[in-house]
Amino acid sequence: MTSTFAIAIVGATGSVGESLLQILEDRGFPVGDLHLLASNESAGRTLPYKGRNLRVRAVEGFDFKAVQLAFFAADQSVTLAHADAVRKAGCSLIDLSGALSAEQAPRVVPEVNAAILEGRTAPLALTSPSSVAVAVTLVLAALRDQVQVDRLVINAALAVSSRGREGVSELARQTAELLNGRSFEPRLFDRQMAFNVLAQVDEPDADGHGLLERRINQDIKALLDNASLNVAVSCHQVPVFFGDSLSVTVQASTPVEVNQVIAALDAASGIELVEAGDYPTVIGDAVGQDEIYVGRVRRGLDDPCELTLWIVSDNVRKGAALNAVQLGELLIKHYL
Amino acid sequence: MTSTFAIAIVGATGSVGESLLQILEDRGFPVGDLHLLASNESAGRTLPYKGRNLRVRAVEGFDFKAVQLAFFAADQSVTLAHADAVRKAGCSLIDLSGALSAEQAPRVVPEVNAAILEGRTAPLALTSPSSVAVAVTLVLAALRDQVQVDRLVINAALAVSSRGREGVSELARQTAELLNGRSFEPRLFDRQMAFNVLAQVDEPDADGHGLLERRINQDIKALLDNASLNVAVSCHQVPVFFGDSLSVTVQASTPVEVNQVIAALDAASGIELVEAGDYPTVIGDAVGQDEIYVGRVRRGLDDPCELTLWIVSDNVRKGAALNAVQLGELLIKHYL
Ligand SMILES: NC(=O)c1ccc[n+]([C@@H]2O[C@H](COP(=O)([O-])OP(=O)(O)OC[C@H]3O[C@@H](n4cnc5c(N)ncnc54)[C@H](OP(=O)(O)O)[C@@H]3O)[C@@H](O)[C@H]2O)c1
Ligand SMILES: NC(=O)c1ccc[n+]([C@@H]2O[C@H](COP(=O)([O-])OP(=O)(O)OC[C@H]3O[C@@H](n4cnc5c(N)ncnc54)[C@H](OP(=O)(O)O)[C@@H]3O)[C@@H](O)[C@H]2O)c1
């Protein structure tokens, strides 16, 4: 057994990659050799880690035999292009893109369903679920004894950082142009993003559902191990830089006891409950934090079995990089 | 029978008041004497109407005997302070604040429930419902023959103009301060509004529901004449200047036929259906328009009886001023 682990981060130069690097350092992950990988374009750049500057290399041609664990924080196509080579190299993989099927790489949030890994052996491939599914299942897992969920309606107002670095710079550019009274051609987004809400975050399929909406639906049912759950998901893009803002309406099989829900959320680790009357927002609460924030816990106006919650979380942190690092911690503790 | 009508607009200097004045002119409403009223502070200002500049007077001390119809587009307290005097003066009233009970002033959207006025006689008091209820009921009324609604979950992303003129100037101020790297103390909103989503738009009650959320719930049940409907409403404040962006998930009593829904929405007047794949937004579609825009019509991923829709509308126009003027047209045609 080695006391440190050789690690690769694919997509190290992106938002999630940068956050991964920071969180590995902050949590004292036992990193041995560290390989920062990206596209050919970024090869040669350097990124700081523990006071040193590490050189970024192209993932193209990288030999995954050199590492025991690889984080994939690039597009789905990048995961798909390399997943086979990773497996053949005997390397474990944690994917953040959602490219792999549930059979190839089960979705795991440690606080919710770590138990499904029992009995498995390395090399393992895991998926860190969509950030919305991470936040929603963390909350529902904390309420397991209080609320038997039949149906969920999730409205997710997603920050532009869910589209990576480019989303952030494009919102800033559009906003500045508008405030200066200049017109512009939208980039990345298919229309004006500043001071507007977009009804979808990716191209919908023939039935009208977006890829991310389907992914969130499947992730939640898998994480809660409840295939018969009804999950409606609507993802919207809002002119916010960082953080997911989620409005979740739950239909339970029995009347909801709000006091019990509040007590359970108060006691849950990884969740900050904001007191009644007040409410959390991405700015000022969630962004930069490991916890997800919950507020506005209320019972339905017309139905005592209905529960509505407001959840905000840092999409890049707990929604992606932190959960992935926690998966890494689980792997090195039990499986590597 | 007179061929013109003496009209008062209380709150003429506000967003809704200004829009009322414009729409009365645009639609050729048979306006005789026109009294523009506001608080003492605005008395003496002038506002343009049909090329003339009309002087604004204080509503305090105004004798409503001088008019046949008064629009109230100020705070609830202003409606409450004057409603009795209006009634005693034999003047009809159209309230936009929602201050009066359903018994005192029924909620009416002409396309949805004008029939409830049959048999009544002037003077009448009517309420133009909350802008969210106007948009949602217009759509559901168009689907009456296709979708038998059991339950609604409404997520309303409201523009800052729902907080009147001050909301608009405060978002502009905060955005400019942030882009210039300056810190600021929030005004009007209880925290940073720029690049943020607020979980509520007014102070929630002991059960956690906001006043507007309750009002939308009641308005919808009244307009659709369906007291047994389950309506969950969440109102959020987004950094958008104008327009409501609504995500509505309907649970129907039978499987939804999307093609029939699309055909019915396509045929409905006052509704613009945007084709599948594309979607409407407040900027570029709804703002400044009389129609409300619908897109992203889709059936549930897990439940064929579920229907989700995206609706955008101009909160100040069809959501308030236009509907009020249409109510005025109904009154002068049948009741005044
Ligand atoms: N942002 C979020 O909220 C969030 C949350 C959960 C999951 N995710 C997922 O995490 C992944 C990364 O997202 P992000 O927000 O960090 O995006 P991002 O800021 O745009 O970064 C993308 C990263 O992928 C790299 N890359 C692009 N093409 C590549 C190629 N052909 N080969 C190798 N690397 C390539 C980029 O490297 P270059 O510098 O060379 O271009 C960059 O490091 C995505 O799959 C996303 O869906 C994101
Ligand atoms: N904005 C929307 O999206 C929307 C939609 C539906 C319904 N409504 C309702 O419509 C009403 C007006 O909203 P708004 O957006 O137009 O607000 P606004 O822009 O803030 O305008 C408020 C108006 O009320 C007047 N007012 C304030 N205090 C008064 C007093 N004591 N006596 C007489 N007039 C007084 C103001 O006159 P001064 O110039 O003298 O201050 C101004 O004309 C509100 O009840 C609102 O809830 C608004």
Image (cartoon, coloured by chain):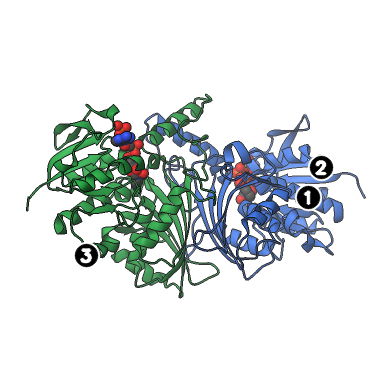
Chain colours: A green, B blue
Alpha-carbon neighbours of circle 3 within 10 Å: few (<14), some, or many (≥20)?
few
Q: Is residue B117 left or right of A190 when viewed as pictured?
A: right
**Is residue B61 among the parts visible in the rendering?**
no
Q: Quadrant of the C terminus of chain B?
A: bottom right
Chain where mark 2 sits: B
Q: Is residue A199 left or right of A106 when viewed as pictured?
A: right
Q: Is residue A71 left or right of B277 when viewed as pictured?
A: left
Q: Quadrant of ligand 1?
A: top left
For the residues beneath circles 3 and 2, the answer to whether they share a chain is no
Q: Is residue A116 left or right of B300 when viewed as pictured?
A: left
First of labels 1, 2 by sequence position: 2
Front-lying residue, A15 or B297: B297
**Mark 1 lies on residue:** B328
Amino acid type of the residue tagged 1 in the rendering:
Gly
Mark 3 vs mark 1, foreground winner is 3
Mark 3 vs mark 2, foreground winner is 3
The secondary structure type at the circle numbered 2 is: loop
**Mark 3 lies on residue:** A118
Amino acid type of the residue tagged 2 in the rendering:
Phe
Outermost residue toward the right? B1
Labels 3 & 2 near each other (Cβ < 8 A): no
- Rendered location of residue A148, percent (x, y): 41, 71
Chain where mark 3 sits: A
Total marks drawn? 3
- Rendered location of residue A106, percent (x, y): 30, 57
**Residue drawn at x 44%, y 29% as measured from the top left:** A173
**Residue drawn at x 74%, y 54% as measured from the top left:** B111
Residue A108 image-quadrant placement: bottom left
**Mark 2 lies on residue:** B29
Labels 1 & 2 near each other (Cβ < 8 A): yes
